[in-house]
Image (tube, rainbow, N blue to C red):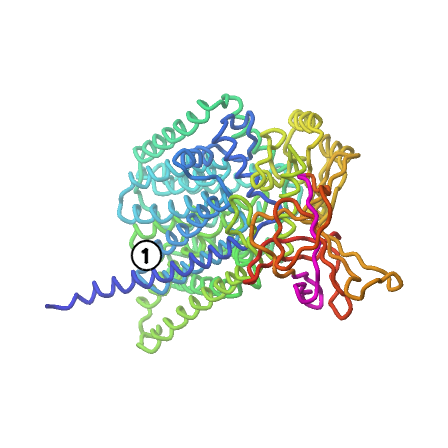
Amino acid sequence: MTDAPAGKRSGWLQTLAVGVATAGLVVAAALVMFSAFMFYDDEGYVLLSLRNFADHGGLYRDVYTQYGPFPFVFYSALHALGFPLTHTAGRLLTLGAWAGTALAAAALTAYVTRHLLLRLLVLAGVFVYLWVMANEPSHPGGLIVLLTVLLAAAGYRWIDRGALNYWAVAVGLVTAALLLTKINIGVFAAFSACAWWLLHHDNDNVRRWALPLTAVWGVALPLALMRPLLTAPWVQSYALVFACSAVAVMAAIAAGATGRAGWRTLGAGLGVAGLTAAVVTGVVLLRGTTPYDLLNGLLLEPLRHPGNFSLRFLWPPGIRIVATLSLAACAAAWILRRRHGTAIDTAIAGLRIALALALAVNLARYPFVRPDYLAFGWALPCLWLFAWPLAGEKPAASAARAWVTLLVLGQCLHVFPVPGSQIAWGSVLLLPLAAFGAWEGAAWLAARFPAAWPASRRTALGAHCVLAAFFAVTAWKFAGVAGRYREGEHLRLPGAELIKLPDHAAARTRVLALNAALHADVLFSLPGMFSFNLWTDLPTPTRANVTHWFSLLDVRRQQAIIDVLEAHPRAGVIIDRGHVDFLAERSLAPKGLLYDYLNRTFEPAFTLDRVEFCIRRGRTIQPFLLGEVLTRQPGAETSAADNTLLRFTALLASGRPVARIEVATPAGPLALHAGNARVEVMPANPRGEPAGAARPQPWPVALAGPTIVSVYYNRDAQPAPAGGATVILRDADGGEVGMVRLRE
């Protein structure tokens, strides 16, 4: 029996290493994702819109969305196959997109460098860089970033191998899908593809005009995109930085571009794009969308979006000067490349290595800084360094790297007009580009200057140790963030059972959801928090649902919501005053017809953490899972053991008896049990009103159905709970039976 060849053994070891690393990072990403729930609740808005389309159709006509039809057709197909549109299922699918993006970026790096540690570093780096995925479950951004990175990885391979027809088919398919997800993202991908095609056209006359044409596109595109907000200084900086970077990237590519693609390549891409668009739009048209609805939702509404909602990106100080100097450096390199080519290529190769190291250090600072924010801000003006063809490079490899660089360039416009999660989604391709661009730069320097470049085994070992350390630090810090899943309590709401939040947040969410389910027949929210509709199975007034409905819904749609709320005396409204103030501080305060109606017609029944559960004025309810602490004055005491009362109305899903009650206090938990407290229970009706006499109950306390619970104890020498404190009911084994919040 003979041993396996060394190459095969090495391949198995590398596969095992990548598999183990991926498995660990996926578990950490899952724990990060299922231990977060964002206050703005775009997750609920997207999930409810997807479910409404899957159940009823009528996209854009009835079902409001800011996005294109592709994710709706995609999720609807999954739903038809039995995929549930719940928080858990949506998060698992987003986790798959997160992991798929990291694997694709790592595979791209491995294809170029054949280096295991670089592959692992990019794998861990992308997981960290896309930390925002945990904040945006089910958002189309996850699908967008996965498709974009897959297109980069597949495109590099096919360009490098000369399979231009495969590249064109992939570009047509993915660009059409992106156009039909967010039209601006598709336009950016088309811009990148057209620029690459022109710069590498096999017709000399076309290629001669490609540089001025693509440079003009690079200047005009941000101006056209950002026209509604060009008076804002941050937008002016954005347009200038992108324009300088685009011109420099086009010039760098043109410096070494050779003819590769022709008219047949363009035809293949356009044909596949047209077929994809026909299938997707055909599905939504057959499900109740009119051609005008499609035009309005896909094109006209997105054009109005920057004027309706935008945020400000804080550019690094001096970024305009940096962008201008970078463009000037590229122009100087272009002019001097024939006479001083070696010196220019040496400087560019060195700068690539320096930029890659800076990016790695930036990643290693996570979670204390946002790695995407700094990377995007500083890397955009420097992209041309990675597009520049080094002397002696294979033309195919240079063309393939140019494709990835152009794709990064176009996607960097994703950050406008809302620089939130879009920063990471639009710039994540910087990681593999920097990794293999720096690797190629180092290899070029080693080949050109073997005497000056350290080549000893000790030097190689040191470099490998540095890469391994970066991977270990990045993965370890990511795992540390995942450790927060051990804290807090499960949400225990339908479709969200795996989500874990801090005690106070989990209890607040349960209290709001249960009271909405018991006291409302229609549920609305300000801003839109439609996860509560999914958890309670309560309908929204209409299917025109969006987080910032006050700025995105027109008067007709707002009036339709008012009409439904007016027809339901038991309608409930959840208002997050903290979020409203957050928007007001950014000059995005809610206003308008529906906003005025809510303030005029509804008032809070109770408030937790500045989140109000509101009912129609003049109506009263008895809230469930909301408690209060009452104390007797010293002169009125009849028993030293009964000077304090904890009272709440319970409706618990678990049938387990309560053996211990823990109340959070600043000085530590107040524990009530058989040794220091007595309990009385009173039956209640479904409205929370008393339905019988109070009776003593022995510990452990069995609570069946709606029940008013009174716990008497001696407050002397006990920590005192504050308003809004969390109360956890536990069984004899310490397991959580239920949660209650005290009134604020």
Could you tell me if residue 584 is visible in this image? no
Neighbours of disc 1 within 10 Å: few (<14), some (14-19), many (20+) = many
Find residue 638 and report its image quarter. Answer: bottom right
Q: 438 or 348, which lies in front?
A: 438
Image coordinates for residue 20, horizontal then vertical, percent? 35, 62
Image coordinates for residue 658, horizontal then vertical, percent? 61, 57
- Whether residue 673 appears in magenta in the rendering, the answer is yes
- Whether residue 240 appears in magenta in the rendering, the answer is no
515 lies left or right of 335: right
Find residue 392 and report its image quarter. Answer: bottom left
Could you tell me if residue 306 is visible in this image? yes
Residue appearing at x 50%, y 23% in the figure: 289
Can you name the residue that lies furthest to the right here?
A: 635
Residue appearing at x 89%, y 63% in the figure: 635
Image coordinates for residue 607, horizontal then vertical, percent? 73, 47
Circle 1 is placed at which residue position?
112
Q: Which residues are magenta?
A: 662-686
Q: Secondary structure at mark 1?
A: helix
- Labels in figure, total: 1
Q: Quadrant of the image for the N terminus?
A: bottom left
Image coordinates for residue 659, horizontal then vertical, percent? 61, 60
Q: Amino acid at mark 1?
A: Val
From what the image shows, is residue 348 above or below residue 308?
Answer: below
Q: 12 or 640, which lies in front?
A: 640
From what the image shows, is residue 654 above or below residue 113?
Answer: above
